[in-house]
Amino acid sequence: MKFDAMLEVCAADMLNISKIARHAEEMGYAGIWTAETKHNPLFQLLLAAEHTQRVALGTAILVAFPRSPMVTAQAAWDLQAVSNGRFMLGLGTQVKPHIERRFATAWDKPVARLRDYILSLRAIWHNFQNGGRMYYAGEFYKFSLMTPFFNPGPIAQPQIPIYIAGVNEGLAQLAGELCDGFHVHPAHTVKYVQEFVKPQIAIGAAKAGRDPAAVSLTSGCFIITGKDSTAMDKTRAWAREQLSFYLSTPSYRIVLEIHGWEDIGAQLSALASRQQWGDMATLISDDILNAFAIEAPPDKLGKALRQRYEGVLDRVSSYIPFVPSDVDDMWRDVITEMHQ
């Protein structure tokens, strides 16, 4: 199992990405992930690639549909070249309101569209590497023009791993059919991964005659820890609030249903619709919190992570973004324990 770092910075700190990434690599993290939230994750990874040598670099996630596959293919190709083959392209669909109202692009059959997107990416990369006629025609995307002037040409390691993120069966099956990895949502439980995600990936893999074990599972994890009870209480309260926000989303209801907690999801959704944000965390009971989050003191955290995720996930990271701090020694111990 590999333990990764999640990076998230504000614009003012963007130039510190190189230092943060280099520090993460020196600490022993196996990979670095960036997400498309407030800033472009590709820009952050480009800086990280320039200043690291070993650590894997990936997007968790890059929003696919607002970008033409050609735009994404070119950016991924460049990052793969600059990083000497360390790049992992993680794609996500986002949700309909964001695609239509924030990005002003089309939302139509997202699973089928993402499938077409992935196939077109691989066709484009094949053309970059091998030349010849560019032709791909799918349900949503068609590419039939590429001249030598615009073709970036071959690179040393052209096989770029594609991960996708999802919660429900459609995207999990698509990962099994076509992808190298699957980003399990941070609001997950082991029961959900074992009884829902893995069987759905296996269904998709069977359709394509693939081994489901070829799909690497990765996720950020809610971690409750701290140097004393006050710090633990603060982190616990934060975890309740963040989980209540995620679990109020109807499309995430499947995770609660697996445990028989669907009524909690309905209550959370009702509170969210009334913007009663302060009341939502009270619905996250200790049993729910313990299913979704790992709680352990610093000296036992690595062991707790291994016990929960060994044989469940292939790559694990903390949901809280990594920044160099006075708890680096704790994370070094976790890294050592996880990579044994």
Image (tube, rainbow, N blue to C red):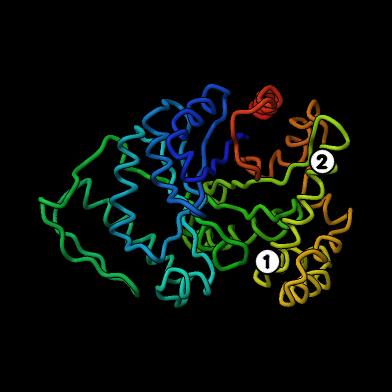
Q: Quadrant of the C terminus?
A: top right
Q: Is residue 54 left or right of residue 74?
A: right
Q: Secondary structure at mark 1?
A: helix
Say what amino acid the circle numbered 1 marks.
Tyr
At label 1, counting other C-alpha atoms closer than 10 Å, the crowd grade (few under 14, some 14-19, many 20 or more) is some
Q: Is residue 159 left or right of residue 326?
A: left
Q: Position of residue 216 (x, y in %)?
A: 55, 46
State the residue lying farthest toward the front: 12
Q: CA distance from mark 2 to mark 1?
A: 23 Å
Q: Quadrant of residue 279?
A: bottom right
Q: Quadrant of the N terminus?
A: top right
Q: Which one is in front, 127 or 251? A: 251
Q: Which one is in front, 90 or 133? A: 90
Residue found at x 18% / y 44%: 153
As displayed, is residue 266 above or below residue 122?
Answer: below
Say what amino acid the circle numbered 2 marks.
Glu
Q: Is residue 317 left or right of residue 12?
A: right
Residue found at x 82% / y 69%: 264
Q: Secondary structure at mark 2?
A: strand
Q: Is residue 250 left or right of residue 214?
A: right
Residue found at x 25% / y 38%: 155
Q: Which label belongs to residue 295?
A: 2
Closer to the chain start, of discs 2 and 1, is: 1
Q: Position of residue 281 (x, y in %)?
A: 81, 60
Q: Quadrant of residue 107?
A: bottom left
Q: Which one is in front, 232 or 319? A: 232
Q: Which label belongs to residue 252?
A: 1
As displayed, is residue 211 above or below residue 108?
Answer: above
Q: Evaluate if marks 2 and 1 touch, with contact meaning CB atoms under 8 Å apart.
A: no
